Amino acid sequence: MRGVFIKPVTNLKGEIRVPGDKSISHRAALFGGMAYGETHISNFLLGQDCLSTLRCLKQLGVPWERQEKEVWIRSEGMDAWQEPIDVLDAGNSGTTLRLMLGALAGSPFTVTMNGDESLRSRPMRRVTDPLKQMGARIMGRREGNLAPLTMMGGQLQGQSFRTPVASAQIKSAILLAGLRASGETSVEEPALSRDHTERMLRGFGVDVQSNQTIVRVHGGGRLTGQAVSVPGDISSAAFFLVLGSLVGQGEIILPDVGINPTRTGILDVLKGMGADIELFNVEEVCGEPRATIRVRPAKLKGIEIAGDMIPRLIDEIPILAVAACLAEGETVIRDAAELRVKETDRISTVVGGLNALGAKVEELPDGLRIQGQTSLYGGQANSLGDHRLAMAWAIAGMLSKEGVSVEDMAAADVSFPDFLAVIKKVAG
Ligand SMILES: O=C(O)C1=C[C@@H](OP(=O)(O)O)[C@@H](O)[C@H](O)C1
Ligand SMILES: C=C(OP(=O)(O)O)C(=O)O
């Protein structure tokens, strides 16, 4: 099998600046495009997903320039957006597709959005149904559930929605449509999902009211261009929190990582498993808290994860499963059926991938049961084009006895360009 061979390591040291937060980068670009005036984004994530968002904006006539990780957007609001003459391609990015659909629902033109093979198989009715109820006309395969999707926007009426799953993409799409609808739009979710949209819209001058799991906006909310500094992505830091906890010796410092409480489930769970993790230099920048995180090796024990914790660490479950394989005792993850509709079915791909490396993992309908053990043998693993799996397998390789050969390691570029260079640096 072809692949990148990741060898075991016993000692690590160093400082790792993880790339900018994916969720915040998408929103900064999109809201900058929706706003009046200039938006300046620093530490923008150059992952393929966020570059897809920037490309879609260009096709809609939004002028922007980029130099390395800095982006300048000079927009005259959504009324200046133009009907794209070609299909908008969201690539591998669910966030791009779903948030764009919400933003575009009130536009007076027709847009077709598509994505790669993985994205074309992910459910979209969770977003297209509420947008249709507000007045948008959307067509797509399987009754509007699968991309390519064509939307003929128009006059929207504000509505109150209760979403069946805690999803920031559903919540955000509805709220963005609500900004161009008549009256009030509200979204109630079963548990609090990441709240970057609410925080950043307030930064752009929009009145967003929220009370626990209910968020409201009013139509006509106008966005004003802002400076946005993007913190490091805790979902990317997660790989090094697990590596630093389970490696034989050393210490890893991760400066400027976002610690929004709707995203810090990984810190709470790893600490609950016994990890030695400390936060320093806590500060709030552009409405988002960030900190320097230090992680040192510790003995981890198994844990149960379910309920409201799941949306706080949904993208970290593949790497948490790697940690659980090397913890003492059993780990059970439940209420995480959403994993089945990510870039891959992350319940079955994580179970298959880890068992092939010598782990003992059982598939549950809505999660995983993992028997912790003292070592992971290693072998061959395939990312199946899923960035979180590519990186989880690489970390598993560093923590394994024999190393892991990862096929399609390049998938990591979706959220963490230079991942391989970074792991080479910390491994010395
Ligand atoms: O809003 C966002 O930026 C995201 C929300 C989550 O998806 P869901 O909204 O589908 O849970 C997450 O998995 C994704 O990586 C990013
Ligand atoms: C699920 C993810 O992203 P998206 O839904 O934007 O494709 C992810 O990054 O793990």
Image (cartoon, rainbow, N blue to C red):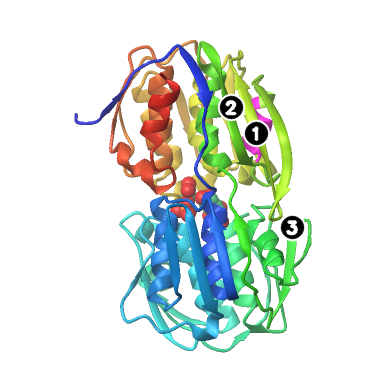
Say what amino acid the circle numbered 3 marks.
Thr
Judged from the image, the secondary structure of the residue bearing numbered disc 3 is: loop
Quadrant showing the C terminus:
top left
Magenta span of residues: 264-270
Q: Is disc 2 surrounded by few (<14), some (14 to 19) or many (20+) residues within 10 Å?
A: many
Q: x%, y% of residue 238? A: 54, 34
Q: State the separation of the CA atoms marked 3 and 2.
A: 33 Å
Question: Where does label 1 land, which residue?
Answer: 292
Quick check: 370 above or below 28?
above
Q: Which of labels 3 and 2 is toward the front?
A: 2
Q: Quadrant of residue 183?
A: bottom right
Quick check: 34 above or below 19?
below
Q: Quadrant of residue 313?
A: top right
Closer to the camera in the image, 263 or 350: 263
Question: Where does label 3 land, which residue?
Answer: 213
In this rendering, does residue 106 appear at all? Answer: no
- Which is more N-terminal, label 2 or label 3? 3
Q: Is residue 391 left or right of residue 2?
A: right
Judged from the image, the secondary structure of the residue bearing numbered disc 1 is: strand
**Given contact means CB atoms under 8 Å apart, are the residues at marks 1 and 3 in contact?**
no
Q: Is residue 180 left or right of residue 136?
A: right
Q: x%, y% of residue 358? A: 38, 18
- Which is more N-terminal, label 1 or label 2? 2
Q: Residue 253: which numbered mark, if any?
A: 2
Q: Is residue 101 left or right of residue 209?
A: left
**Given contact means CB atoms under 8 Å apart, are the residues at marks 2 and 1 in contact?**
yes
Judged from the image, the secondary structure of the residue bearing numbered disc 2 is: strand
Residue at point 46% right, 25% down? 361
Q: Is disc 3 surrounded by few (<14), some (14 to 19) or many (20+) residues within 10 Å?
A: some
Q: x%, y% of residue 118? A: 35, 54
Q: State the separation of the CA atoms marked 1 and 3.
A: 29 Å
Residue at point 19% right, 29% down? 1
